[in-house]
Image (cartoon, grey):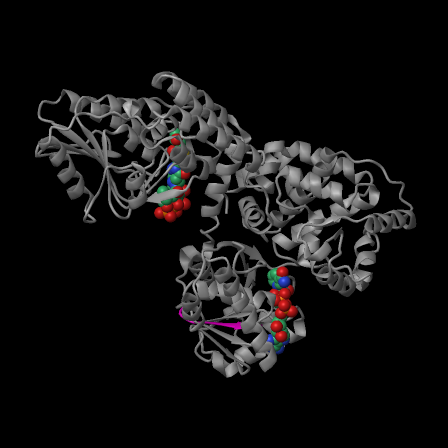
Amino acid sequence: MTSVSPTLAVRRELRNRILVVTVDNPPVNALGVAVRCALSDVIEAAEHDAAVDAVVLIGAGRNFIGGADIKEFGKPPLPPSLPVVCNRIEACRKPVVAAIHGAALGGGLEIALAAHYRIALANARLGLPEVTLGLLPGAGGTQRAPRLVGAQAALDLMLSGRHVGAQEALALGLVDRIGETDDVLHEGLAYVQALLDAKAPTRRTRDASGLADRTASRAAIEAARVDVTKKSRGLFSPLKIVDAVQAALEMPFDDGLNHERQLFLQCLDSPQRAGLIHAFFAEREVLKAPETRHAKPRVLASVGVIGGGTMGAGIAVALLDAGLPVTMIERDDSSLARGRANIEKVYDGLIAKGRMTADAKAAVLARWSGSTSYDALATADLVIEAVFEDMSIKQAVFAELDRVCKSGAVLATNTSYLDIDALAASISRPGDVVGLHFFSPANIMKLLEVVVPAQVSADVVATAFELAKKLRKVPVRAGVCDGFIGNRVLAIYRAAADHMMEDGASPYQIDRAVREFGFPMGPFQVADLAGGDIGWATRKRRAATRDPQQRYVQIADRICERGWFGQKTGRGYYRYTDGARTGTPDPDVEAIIDSERERAGVTPRAFSNEEIMRRYMAAMINEGANVVHQRIALRPLDVDVTFLYGYGFPRHRGGPMQYADSVGLATVLADIREFAQEDPVFWQPSPLIVDLVERGATLASLNHAA
Ligand code: 3HC
Ligand code: NAI
């Protein structure tokens, strides 16, 4: 047995004339330049080494290979390129076998496709997720996968980016065999030995016949093109994937590979790639809040929820779905019954769609218990309050929690706007109080703002992050202020939209412009969905303290005064006839807007969609920067993740802060200053933006500073 180490990232070891090549590049064995060089060299050497009969490729640690090294994208390329490495593997005159455990994704799967045979362990996850990063498989994946599994299956993998398990991979023909144990080296060696014993040839995927039925392949490509054109809403790489598969059908392999390279480079250059990769790293970075580094989470085995309304019920479902037992507290028996019914409605909806069985529902609900007495919370590890948005009611609830909860219980509030510092200070254990701001519907929306009051203990914050993990939510750490990160910024760009509406743009045009930018809905559609009454109540509450200098558009109040609260009342900014969920423009609303313009003395003017978005985004970016400046958000990326997961911000633009950098902060600042000429109270440039522009720096430069 010999053991040579050409680089730290790739190890090789000869076992019984089989060369074991182990990619060992933690954390996910990404194919950085050191790995690419070493893999090329190792294959080259193996081919010329008379002591080697065959090669088995494996990954060290938990995965085979997680893909190309995403951190290298956007930097000058370093040879050898991954397609060259894959070609080198495929050209090897001795059998090369990929033995896959854990993730074989993107370039990782492309390496495996370039090998001559593939074996997967039961825990393998294979996929070509490049589309989720704004890319296409650029190391032969678009050419080899269709040849191996056919155009339709390959397109499905590449356009969805989904991961398939070992069984499905076998059924598709992506792998040849499934290992019986969880020892990847053992399984790989046994398979290679079996192939050697059978004198199996070096079978090359480029010669595989998956595209032999040209008519079916062409039909699959055309169907994919139609589907992508309809569904991918301005995304750049999906159509390029279809083009690349078409090349696989129409061109000889090497020409197809060259074509794939050109398309890949176009994707690499696109701002969408930059936005999507920013999102990939940002959603991992938010998990690393300072408290999670220093403190250990408390035990989290049982949870109480107070209130069974919209949010309480949704939060309870999220907790139940994560396998946690939930005790719900309500004011009285009938409210409790309504809370339970709200939960059941969610599961009944799943049953109606065939996504859950009645037995499964019963099993989940067996973990639920309800009470009108706070004493039922005596043993809860965590309690989440979701009662009416009223400080005195919440303080009364927290006084009860202070009385009954065991020492060390985490006491959380789902308040949207109230001062959590004040709430915490009202009880004897402020160190246990944290904000857990869920978004509606709480069992579906991924965002969880973890609001960190001044006196909270670090292990309580760590527990909140642990809870997010259990619930599969994306936590963002936020400081205490009116609206935290998301709703505070929302209030500002919503106001900008209101100003534009009064100045001459219709809500329908604004919604359209915002949708065309990539949001699933515009602000007025969102208002109709959420219900106008909530915002109206808040506006009335704040009327007395509102700055009289501040522009206040009254159109929403006029609409609410008519009882038009949106979808639930059949009318809002839109009309919803017969319970429809998509509204139609309403001439009566346009008439209200006209008369409000007159009352305010505004001469309406035309807005282009481009100007609408400049103003909308400038407002969002400016307040996002303020939130960072005041340390409500730790870094710009925390604002980005908040908007990606809580507000439907188009992922391919990376979030408002990343978008600001892509437009150029100087341009954004110039816009704000231009708009400030009309309304200097509303448009005050964030000191952070001014400072960054003066220094020629980007918001992204602050992402690693916290
Ligand atoms: N390149 C660089 N770093 C990567 C990476 C990659 N391909 N994949 C993951 N990482 C990093 C993460 O950023 C994270 O870093 P951190 O600890 O500093 O935050 C660390 O590895 C661990 O990642 P996860 O927390 O995601 O680990 P999990 O165990 O939960 O998941 C995984 C592992 C399934 C491999 C997941 O990381 C993943 O999905 N990675 C991306 C896979 C992918 O998209 N591959 C395609 C890349 S593009 C490509 O290959 C182009 C080619 O066609 C030319
Ligand atoms: P809701 O009105 O639907 O439900 C509130 C529930 O609390 C009611 O069922 C009520 O019976 C119960 N309740 C009131 N006082 C109680 C008490 N003293 N003890 C026990 N139960 C009591 O309200 P919703 O929308 O669920 O909001 C709850 C909280 O969540 C509020 O603080 C709100 O600001 C916040 N929130 C709301 C969001 C939304 O989209 N609706 C989003 C995020 C947070």
Q: Is residue 78 left or right of residue 228?
A: left
Q: Is residue 311 left or right of residue 584?
A: left
Q: Is residue 48 left or right of residue 674?
A: left
Residue 696 seen by the camera:
no
Q: Is residue 676 above or below residue 137?
A: below
If the picture is divided into quarters, which one holds ligand 1?
A: top left
Q: Nearer the viewer, residue 238 or 430?
A: 238
Q: Is residue 519 left or right of residue 71?
A: right
* Percent position of residue 492, x then y: 71, 49
Q: Nearer the viewer, residue 312 or 636?
A: 312
Residue 193 seen by the camera:
yes
Residue at the spot 66% in from the left edge and 32% down from the top edge:
666
Q: Is residue 258 magenta?
A: no
Q: Is residue 304 magenta?
A: yes
* Percent position of residue 636, x then y: 56, 44
Residues rendered magenta in the picture: 301-307
Residue at the spot 29% in from the left edge and 31% down from the top edge:
113
